[in-house]
Amino acid sequence: MPRRLTTTGGRPVADNQNSITAGPRGPVLLQDYQLLEKLAHQNRERIPERVVHAKGWGAHGTFTVTGDITEYTGASMFSKVGKQVPLIVRFSTVAGELGAADAERDVRGFGVKFYTDEGNWDLVGNNTPVFFVRDPYKFPDFIHTQKRHPRTNLRSNTAMWDFWSLSPESLHQVTILMSDRGIPVAPMYMNGYGSHTYSFWNEDGERTWVKFHFKTQQGHRHYTNAEAAELIGRTRESYQEELYGAIERGEFPKWTLNVQVMPEADAEKAPFNPFDLTKVWPHAAWPLIEVGVMELNRNPDNYFAEIEQLALSPSNIVPGIGWSPDKMLQARIFSYADAHRYRLGAHYEALPVNRPKSEVAHYHKDGPMRFFDNNEQTPDAFYEPNSFGGPAQDASVGEPPLRISGDADRWDHRDGNDDYTQPGNLFRLFNDEQKKRLFGNIAAAMAGVPEEIVQRQLVHFHRADPAYAEGVARALGVENRAAATEPVGA
Ligand code: NDP
């Protein structure tokens, strides 16, 4: 005897095949509530897709500490070598909608939620160490260039290159995007980066700036444009197939987590702004320190509940980890949590996949879908401070002060910024074949872009390395007027 089917109200269902009609050919009766309920539920099976990072793939796993970094951080998850914490990861593309093909040229989101014993720590980064803009004021405009044109409802190469060529800080990320790493074969064959500068703080209240790097243990694998086009003709779901399949077969992907650390006082002396999201910290000056291994070893049981409703946000940090003055990070602290409140509702953090595995005790109250118990344990303590033993602050987890100050103004984010050296360094790392593919990928992505915009962008390539502009111009079959032209900034 199978389990009994019930309504959402728990009543056993006698017939799930035939609606109630007036006679065998007759119209349906309004009283067939179960029919109405099924139709109404179907209408509500979607929530708004994420405006960015809509298409994603994810899995559960564990993080194991292999290196001692307790001199930098008091975070409980790093407290001793061998310690493990459960986690969940969501990978994604940025621009495509929910039904987009997986193997598209795009930056990949690489977001991890660590369920630590002092709350959730979300490290919500990308497969690239940098980003297209350094000031969040420009972020909505940038995303508009990646999405559909309002009239044609098509993506626009012209919009992308117009914006990039007017925003030279994007050159570093554009170079990575157009390089071989722009189309990883599947999530396990790419690195992940926290991208922003964060901070560690230790038991003595000392702060250290930090960058996070997940290095793939599966090796880098990517598709060329031609390989991706052929693949997408066969399957649009290649990442889901690869990631889900590998984990089902017991082939658990792994990444080594490394950090770069910079003493708080050294930030002033760095030759570039260490809080600028368009810059990396060169490894020679700030070497990688190994911290642990992340393994993905369990597929979600319900994709919607665990991946579509997974709410990652840089606002989730834990004692021992802090933010930094990075303007983009500061904006994401607000906008990610706000996106979840909009998509999932005010109590999104109480959903099973988002709920911390450590104790949660707050005084947020009602609103749609208030489904959790009184955290206060005594119903009389529903405000704070109170005399009824409700949860109270604990000064011992207080963060040391952020030693940053300055005059409030709209400071020019371009001022003194070198947008060209680091993209040039990356270009010079590529061998001849990699450079050739870079030129070809850029030429393909520039199809249909007006000559004036192409020439403006060639100037940026030229400033990074004259051979970069030469190669792109050759691939496009256009004259390279870059050396004689001044760059244009916005
Ligand atoms: P290093 O030679 O020490 O490091 C080069 C880095 O480049 C490695 O981390 C490597 O990653 C990465 N890399 C190789 N090919 C690509 C690609 N197509 N797209 C993105 N990254 C790639 O030099 P530096 O630290 O001095 O950095 C030089 C340049 O390398 C930087 O300007 C930056 O563009 C790029 N880079 C630097 C990183 C950093 O944190 N310093 C991180 C990633 C890129 P892997 O080891 O996994 O192969």
Image (cartoon, helix red, strand yellow):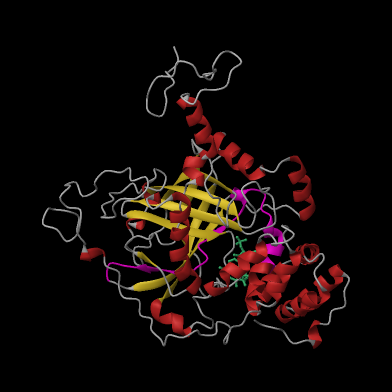
Residue 238 relative to residue 434: left or right: left
Image location of residue 277, percent across then percent down: 54, 72
Image location of residue 7, percent across then percent down: 42, 25
242 is higher (above) or lower (below) than 435? above
Residue 372 inside the magenta-drawn segment? no
Identify the residue at image location x=54%, y=22%.
28
The answer to whether residue 131 shows anywhere in this view is no
Identify the residue at image location x=31%, y=54%.
118
Say which of 293 and 9 sits in front. Answer: 9
The answer to whether residue 209 shows anywhere in this view is yes
55 is higher (above) or lower (below) than 195? above
Residue 183 inside the magenta-drawn segment? yes
Image location of residue 347, percent across then percent down: 37, 50
Q: Count up the numbered dots.
A: 0
The quarter of the rendering in which ligand 1 is drawn is bottom right
Residue 8 falls in image quadrant: top left
